Amino acid sequence: MLPQFPLSTSLANTCFGFEADFTADLRCIPMAVRRKLDLAGVKLKLQHWSELGEAERDQLLAWPDDPSAIEALRQHLQARSAALSAGPAKDLARPDAEPWQQADQLPEVLAASCTQLGLEIRSSGWAELDELQRFALVKLSHPGHEHRNLARALAEFELLVADG
């Protein structure tokens, strides 16, 4: 049984417009859940996610992101994933001063991806974002990522410099 939490008013349960293709049925792991997984130090595979019922996926999206809730999430997922066919979720190092946790400097990985795609972002834009938005942009800009949603996310967050 999942712990019951009051609905979060934080960023914990936010889904972005660029995720709309899969957030209606939560068939993929939304950025808000991916951020909580990183904070909890848990590597949950898409196979794990797919084996969870819709109500469980909804609950994980609604799960708060304060430190005590993140620790409860870690414990819950370690126990829950052990019963799944993909086996127990792997442990990850918990984030410490990751680029998405730093509002003062545009991460190099994001700047490089924007250059590669020919996109220019507002110089003050990064500092205006909340942590979940910064997390999403860093994840979407990783090398090897197809960057399909990066331009959409930048537009949604109103970071793109308008032409002309």
Image: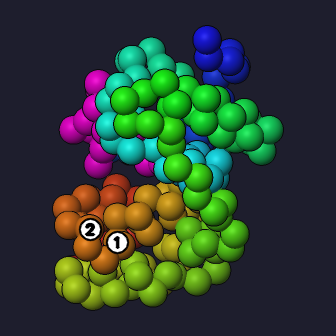
Residue 142, position in %: x, y? 36, 73
Seen at 33% across and 59% down, the residue is: 153
Image check: 14 left or right of 157?
A: right
Seen at 32% across and 37% down, the residue is: 47
Q: Is mark 2 on a helix, strand or loop?
A: loop
Q: Start and end of the magenta stretch?
A: 18-34
Task: Kindly tell me whether residue 148 is visible in this rendering.
Answer: yes
Residue 30 higher or lower than 101, as above or below: above
Residue 7, position in %: x, y? 64, 22
Seen at 52% across and 31% down, the residue is: 82
Dot 1 crowding, Cα within 10 Å, few <14, some 14–19, many 20+: many
Kindly check if marks 1 and 2 are in contact, taking CB atoms under 8 A apart as contact: yes
Question: Depth-wise, is mark 1 or mark 2 nearer the camera?
Answer: 2
**Residue 141's mark?**
1
Residue 71, position in %: x, y? 74, 40
The quarter of the image holding the N terminus is top right
Q: Is residue 90 magenta?
A: no
Q: Identify the residue position indicated by label 2 in the image.
A: 145
